[in-house]
Image (cartoon, rainbow, N blue to C red):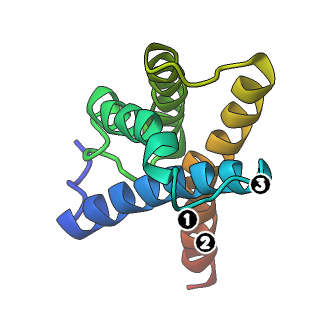
Amino acid sequence: MSPRPAPRTVTVALIVDLVLVVVFAAIGRASHHEDVLAGLVTTSWPFLVGAFAGWLVTRGWRAPLAPVRTGVGLWVTTVVIGMLLRVVSSQGVELAFIIVASIVLFVFLVGWRFAVRAIRGGRRSTR
């Protein structure tokens, strides 16, 4: 059995994920020349709910830094639930948006975990 991650690691990983989801929403609003702050809650809430669900589905607290075990499941859940909630809340969902959101959220939610793994691996190999 692998050691339990420190509570601080779990908390920081969750916060990083949520912040990156909000950054994704802000970038999207800005790219459409919309007032970023005025509609940020409306744009981000479906994906934030998806991210919380992803943490539950993947049991993210068990391996918060794992790119595949946690990151990929979190990414899929965030995109799927986020899109479904956008549909039921009458927000736009077009194929191009699904593709772009999937790519950006993959880079954000999985990418930072790979970066941490690479940095930590690099430190270990230099010791």
Residue at 67% from the left image edge and 32% from the top image edge: 102
The local crowd at label 3, few if under 14, some if 14 to 19, many if 20 or more residues have their Cα within 10 Å, is few
The local crowd at label 1, few if under 14, some if 14 to 19, many if 20 or more residues have their Cα within 10 Å, is some
- Displayed quadrant of residue 118: bottom right
In the rendered image, the vertical position of residue 110 relative to residue 127, given as above or below: above
Quarter of the image with the C terminus in it: bottom right
Residue at 61% from the left image edge and 72% from the top image edge: 119
Q: Is residue 121 left or right of residue 7?
A: right
Residue at 34% from the left image edge and 31% from the top image edge: 58
Residue at 31% from the left image edge and 26% from the top image edge: 57
Amino acid at dot 2: Ile
Residue marked by disc 3: 33
Amino acid at dot 1: Val
Q: Which numbered mark, 3 or 1, is in the foreground of this view? A: 3
Determine the CA span between mark 3 and mark 1.
33 Å
Determine the CA span between mark 2 and mark 1.
5 Å
Rendering coords of residue 15 (x, y %): 36, 61
Residue marked by disc 1: 116
Disc 2 + disc 1, Cβ < 8 Å: yes
**Helix or strand or loop: what does disc 1 sit on?**
helix
Rendering coords of residue 53 (x, y %): 32, 30
Residue marked by disc 2: 119
Quarter of the image with the N terminus in it: top left
In the rendered image, the vertical position of residue 3 relative to residue 88, given as above or below: below
